[in-house]
Amino acid sequence: MKKIKFQKSLPFVFLSPFLILFGLFYIAPLVYGFYLSLFHRYGLRPATFVGLKNYVQVFNDANFWFSILNMTKFFLIQGSIMIGLALIFALYIDNEKNHFRGLFRMIYYIPFAIPTAISGILWGFMYSKSLSPFQSIFGLVGLHPNFLSSGSLFWSIINIVTWEWAGYNMIILYSGLQSIPRELYEAAHIDGAKSFDIIKYVKIPLIVPSLILSIVFTVIGTFQIFNEPYVLGSMTFIPPSFTPNLYIYTTAFSYGNFNYAAALAIILALVTFAGSMVFMRFAGFKEE
Amino acid sequence: MKKYVISLLVISMLLLSLAAFADTVQLPTYNGPAVTLTFWSWVPGISNSIAAFEKAYPNIKINYVNVGANFTEYNKLLTALSAGSGAPDVAQIEYQVLPTFISYGGLVDLTKYGINKYESLFVPWTWNQVKSGNGVYAVPQDTGPLALAYNKAIFAKYDLTVPTTWEEFEKDAQKLYQESNGTVYMTNFNAIGASNVNWLVGLIWAAGGQLWTSNGNNWVQTINSPIAKKVVSYWGNMVNKGYISSYEPFTSDWYNAMSNGKIASMISAAWLPLLLANNLSNQYAGQWQIVPLPYFAGEKSTSGNWGGSTDAVTVQSKYPEASMIFALWLNANPTSTTLDNENGGLFPAAITGLEDPTMHNTSTNTDKFFGGQDVNQAFFDASDIVNVNFAWAPWANYFFNSFANYMNEALSGKMTWDQAMDQLQSSTLNYAQTQGFNVK
Amino acid sequence: MDTKKSFYSPSTVTMVALMFVASAYFLLPLFWIIIASTKSDSQLFSTNPLWFALPFNALNNIFNTSSYDGATLWRWFSNSIIYAGSVSAGTTLISAMAGFAFSKYDFFGKNILFYIILGAIMVPTTALVLPVYLLMHGLNLINTYWAVILPSLVNPFSIYLMRIFWMQEFPNELIDAAHVDGASDFTIFFRIGLPLVKGGLATVALFSFVSTWNNFFLPLVVISKSNLFPLTLGISIWTSLTSTGRGPSYGAITMGILISIVPLILAFILLRRYWQSGLSSGAVKG
């Protein structure tokens, strides 16, 4: 019997549903967004072509760069705390000798199942003085912190985001740890390595790709933070320049400057891309 | 006693003259084909008024949608207008963002449909607010003239006199601060968050300040005028000294502090008493009382406005005339305004609504919460002395965010209150100019 | 055996204790919301936030949250199921097909296309949502279920996952053998292939269900009719209404929040086999 050859068009038959949607809802909007960014339009009047003028304005927009800086700071602090915790958790649940591994894995991962908008509201309630369980706890040592004041808001959101995503990153790192051949540990053990040395010299170097993946996801996620500050906005004042996405949303939907918002979004995409690339290059991370 | 008789006399004369007005103008009838209108609003219980409307106008059906309060709704409305579809026929819009939507080109000039005939039905300053040039772009719905609500029990406990001027108010605040060791605040600084900064604008308004004036398309912005700075510093300094609290209004913390007697008074708009009666605990029920807004010594007694809305017809409406008829009936028919007052606490902008006897029925829960006082009457008096010359600019949305931001900066001590107002003026001016407005 | 530490060694006890402290941190908000949802508003403000108060008000809150505004909460609940269910089914099939193509065929521009798709993960949602809104409007899909469903079907990360599952779970030799038997590629994909990668399918299905159930930004922009809101949007609007004194009671909101998070938490606990095995079978090996 003759072997049937793959037809050239076949892969595209399998790809077509995805490609059509990808074209419609990723590529076309990006192209259209770029097109929009070249115009100025106020209200329902006709748009006028302004070339790259909106981009020039973006570079001089102190609010936008404040938001980028704010999230860079957020990433450096929150990202370190979260990935640090995730790594400790992952190392713990990866080690077969430890107790309650399944239970902890489950518990730490649960916040991932809760919508970030809902988490924001939930924590917002818990931060408010009259509903907060923390006030009585902190009250014991004579503290009455206001978690929603402008000074503490940054840290309060760091806590929410860490709560939401630490478990998710733990799973990414755990997957990396699970793929390390167990014989390596035995070999190291026979060579007299202590468990801390195994972690330092065997486990962590081998999960660098997972760590990079975690970091890159965190970079992307941080520059896109929107839901938490948006929902907290009904409980306390959050300036639109708190995060780039909040600023772009406000510019577009509250001020009605869709064209300028389109330019902001494209610059944000480039900033995110650059930020992610730095880490990928830094670690010599390659796909495959 | 004598004073009482006189004021009663004045009121009844006023009511009579208003009634005479009202009789001359009948709300329009609708003879067109059966239509369904979409209506966006966040007034609690407004479906009762809508049901009454549908009964009176069987050919007009209303599809009522609550898409969220103020900014949540405006964002959706602006987007839908910009995209060319998805906007409702009629939308609730507060006075302060009306110029934004008018300048955006999103609202129908209702003079085409003869709205000018109905001008006499509404309180004069509200009509100024819905006008732009020769056009009229919305029907006034409710207003928020300012008065002072105070807690009698706390005033009695600390032996405070009810202030008539801001100077006396500050003396009370200082006394309260000292006697209570800073545990009870005189009032709350409410200008926290973009949707609440209008409280402070209302106080600037009451003091005779103006933020914007316009002549055709030429604008002058005077956010950091001496009057505005004086008002803002007055409140800011009291916050700095710890005399007054700075909770974000309407949050659970704010309600709780008000409930528990941590806050002795509240600069209140006309729509606020119902919210207080509904949301505060009963600990001080019957102890609250409303008196006229204090004023700066040497000035005259005036008031400003905080909040209140209009109903506007959007350019996407296929039935602008039916929409206007709906908006008019909803806000000028006494049955409807009374229902909105009971359910949503709306203080009507229509004279017919204000004069309706049911508005002065003091057996409501709200009136009981205020010790049996005729609450609406107190605000009726406030409404009479609202400064008429106050206008908003089309870049108000930016202004509110910026105002909230600078108030926050000043609150946290990063700048003085005067600096905040100066920076607010320059950043807002800069924004308006980059948007292509002709503004100085 | 000599390496097995005693349960009682000090370092082990410290470590386990710390892990329990961390557990308390992750569970605290859930514990709080369960307590809060059983209280009336005055109990919420006056009783210990971390313990139940009498009279038990849970039924009353369920009634309030269910009846507010014409049972709109349950309408949102079913909307969330419709959105998440259809996106989950659609994404799983689409990603399985695309992953199959990327792992089993060689075609022109394959690598470049794959990198473009991966790069798409980095595009901020705001950059897409705004033009998507205008596009949807052009297609007359604003304020329909499609406005949320169609854009959500495109999930680059699912493609990435499925490609790995096809490479690992479905050996190329099987394809060759099936070809010898005369099976077409479609038969191979549907009859032989899909059952073999069902772990991957379950993972992708679960994750796209979760991400759609949790989506907030897209519906915020493209949906303005409250009868089409998903739970996330509806509850955030309730919260903003209540913060202006014009919404449901806090009791109704906290109960609404509990109702909105319970299904996914249950799904995660019941389906843990899938996401755990799915993820640890090397889904994210760099």
Image (tube, coloured by chain):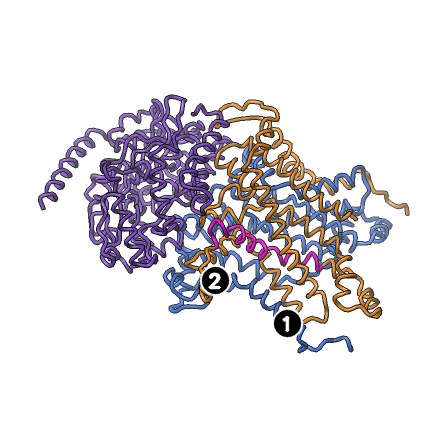
Quarter assignment of residue B226: top left
Check residue A157 for magenta coloring.
yes
Q: Is residue A134 depicted above or below A231 in this figure?
A: below
Q: Give the magenta range.
A: A147-174
Q: Is residue A230 visible?
A: yes
Q: Nearer the viewer, residue B344 or B33?
A: B344
Few, some or many residues within 10 Å of mark 1 (<14, 14–19, 20+)? few
Dots 2 and 1 on the same chain? no
Q: Chain of mark 2?
A: A
Name the spot of residue B322 as percent of width and height, x first: 35, 31
Q: Nearer the viewer, residue C114 or B318?
A: C114
What's the residue type where badge 2 is placed? Phe
Judging by the rendered image, the residue that carries numbered circle 2 is A134
Depth order, front residue of B333/B19: B19
- In percent of width and height, residue C177 lies at 86, 52
The reply to whether residue C234 is visible in this rendering is no
Q: Chain of mark 1?
A: C
Q: Name the tint of chain C in the rendering.
A: blue
Q: Which residue is mark 1?
A: C14
Chain A hue? orange
Q: Amino acid at mark 1?
A: Thr
Main SS of residues in magenta: helix
Q: Residue furthest left?
A: B2
Q: Quadrant of residue A166?
A: bottom right
